[in-house]
Image (cartoon, coloured by chain):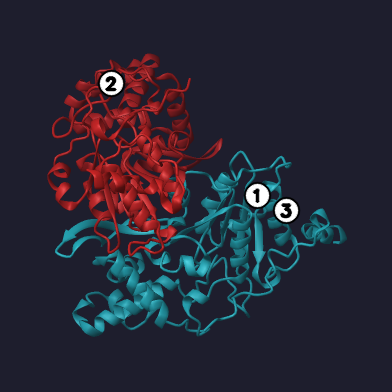
Chain colours: A red, B cyan
């Protein structure tokens, strides 16, 4: 323990200068040390693990990794609210059990109608409008909606320790990307303000979109069909499409991120995989192997043997959410 | 004419300081003035057309805009060479007229077999291998192959005036993207060295790729099916996916770029559309309305009325290709 504490403290004493802790909301311990040791190794020109800045690519899942995802993915909460709002104006749109459940805010009812029902609800909330109209809807919703248990804005349900990690990585020359199963146009509405991540560094799932020239000029219209599902094996594929390089650091929290972490750590050079483990029922939620949201089985089974780092939220994080600024 | 010359020269005299010409290979004239006036307007904080650096997005087609495309798209030349090389080792792969034509270097024969034949040749040259194997093949080919009429390396068939424009824009805070009908994995092999464009700023067409974990670890395998055709109305769609913002400057040379230029110039703020017009049969090639490569009809018909700028290669460009460095 004494030796480990010394290692952890080493970054404070570089060149005799006391540097500020780059991750103040991370408690001292194996996870914090592993992250800092990795960053030091890939940024030190004298290290065998040195990586040029152009190749310092870090990718992060969003739901459950950068912001919370309970009791249901926030994008589903958005879709439910949108369907309810439209049904008020025109109840005739509720043509299925899934849509009726959505209009009543009954998420269990939507999930009971299966993947098809969920896609129908998402399509109703996301399609049939231009990308810019959709983004305005998301922005309006973020301003109005509040999380059911914390009463916070959804875009304030972000993890303070991960915000610090993103800043730290950028300070050390990394490019930080979101690679999410959530919708690319949805996340881009808040990625800059919430995470300091430019919209061109957001990768996500998407519906088909079409370029249509109407009376008001050209628009990109969102269609009800899925174009790309950025989950599981789709994540490395999307990383190649959008980024064109293999990342050297990846963060996730569920089995949907497994292939992204595997891809990141199977390159010839150094690679770090970080799993955020939801262990804090008091300050956040505790869940992993069971349920419908953020299921983590293979990651828990194989991650430790692969040398992947687990951030245990209860013990590794001194703070969960940032102080609310209102 | 006298007034126009004064306008053109104005950038030389800003604040009484004589600045270097940012586009030395562009002859003085309307096209050069239009480009420089636009850049000055969007970068001058006192201008009504000022655009913050984060929104200074410039997009460029590749074939015929940044590099040459005659007598046939260079990626087809690559595919033909690849098929011929593989047929030497295993003639049994030549299962169709299109593939036989390819093995004989008979581009006309491939084109005669229609779009299906062309896709078959491209699939044979591009699929059935990992992305990294493919990129190595492209790099090897670029080192060996020479253009049939100029004897240059293909990646030296790039336009010196466009290289200057890319540098000028980046110096003025623009992000410069390639948005090409050509293959994204193909272009990324040379985009950094040829154009100074990072691989994450390349957008292109692509085949389906799959994440496969084999004995040698995970790989992204290229499949023979088309995933996305980044041409015509596909270009604005791809720009939204990859960049997430509407560009303010777009350069192209054919009707395949029309929608990209239209999208760029139909935003609320300023927008510049630039067509490279192939008018120089002596130093390059002269073509537009007819043929199979780089056809430009709608652009010529509608572009002038839309205020789009035409770079006439014969009169506007003092140099076509950079001096060859061997």
Q: Quadrant of residue A120?
A: top left
Q: Is residue A319 shown left or right of residue B59?
A: left
Q: Residue at x 22, y 48 (%)?
A: A308
Q: Nearer the viewer, residue B164 or B86?
A: B164
Q: Mark 3 or mark 1: which is in front?
A: 3
Kind of element beneath mark 1: helix
Q: Mark 2 or mark 1: which is in front?
A: 2
Question: Which of the labelled discs sits on residue B37, or is there none?
Answer: 3
Question: Which of the labelled discs sits on residue B306, or is there none?
Answer: 1
Q: Is residue B13 shown left or right of residue B280?
A: right
Residue A162 in the image: state x and y as whole percent.
36, 38
Please determine if labels 2 and 1 lie on a single subunit: no
Chain holding disc 2 = A
Q: Residue at x 38, y 61 (%)?
A: A51
- Could you tell which of marks 3 and 1 lies nearer the N-terminus? 3
User: Dot 3, crowdedness within 10 Å: few (<14), some or many (≥20)?
Assistant: some
Measured Cα–Cα span from mark 3 to mark 2? 53 Å
């Amino acid at each position: 323990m004494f030796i480990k504490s010394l290692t952890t403290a080493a970054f404070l004493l570089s060149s005799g200068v006391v540097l500020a802790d780059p991750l103040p909301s991370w408690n001292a311990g194996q996870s914090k040390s592993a992250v800092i040791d990795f960053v030091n190794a890939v940024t030190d020109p004298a290290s065998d693990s040195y990586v040029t800045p152009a190749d310092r690519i870090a990718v992060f899942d969003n739901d459950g990794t950068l912001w919370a995802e309970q009791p249901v993915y926030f994008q589903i909460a958005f879709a439910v609210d949108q369907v309810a709002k439209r049904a008020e104006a025109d109840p005739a749109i509720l043509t299925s059990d899934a849509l009726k459940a959505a209009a009543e805010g009954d998420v269990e009812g939507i999930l009971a109608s299966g993947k098809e029902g969920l896609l129908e609800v998402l399509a109703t909330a996301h399609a049939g409008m231009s990308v810019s109209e959709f983004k305005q809807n998301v922005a309006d919703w973020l301003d109005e909606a509040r999380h059911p248990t914390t009463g916070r804005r959804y875009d304030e349900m972000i993890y303070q320790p991960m915000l610090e990690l993103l800043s730290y990585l950028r300070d050390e020359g990394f490019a930080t990307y979101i690679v999410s199963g959530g919708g690319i146009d949805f996340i881009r509405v808040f990625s800059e303000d919430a995470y300091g991540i430019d919209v061109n560094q957001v990768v996500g799932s998407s519906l088909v979109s079409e370029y249509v020239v109407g009376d008001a000029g050209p628009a990109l219209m969102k269609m009800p069909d899925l174009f790309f599902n950025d989950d599981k094996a789709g994540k490395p594929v999307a990383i190649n499409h959008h980024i064109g390089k293999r990342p050297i650091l990846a963060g996730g929290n569920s089995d949907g991120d497994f292939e992204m972490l595997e891809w990141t750590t199977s390159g010839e050079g150094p690679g770090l995989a970080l799993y955020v483990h939801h262990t804090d029922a008091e300050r956040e939620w505790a869940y992993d192997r069971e349920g419908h949201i953020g299921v983590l089985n293979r990651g828990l089974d194989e991650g430790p043997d692969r040398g992947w780092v687990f951030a245990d939220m209860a013990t590794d994080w001194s703070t969960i959410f940032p102080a609310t600024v209102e």
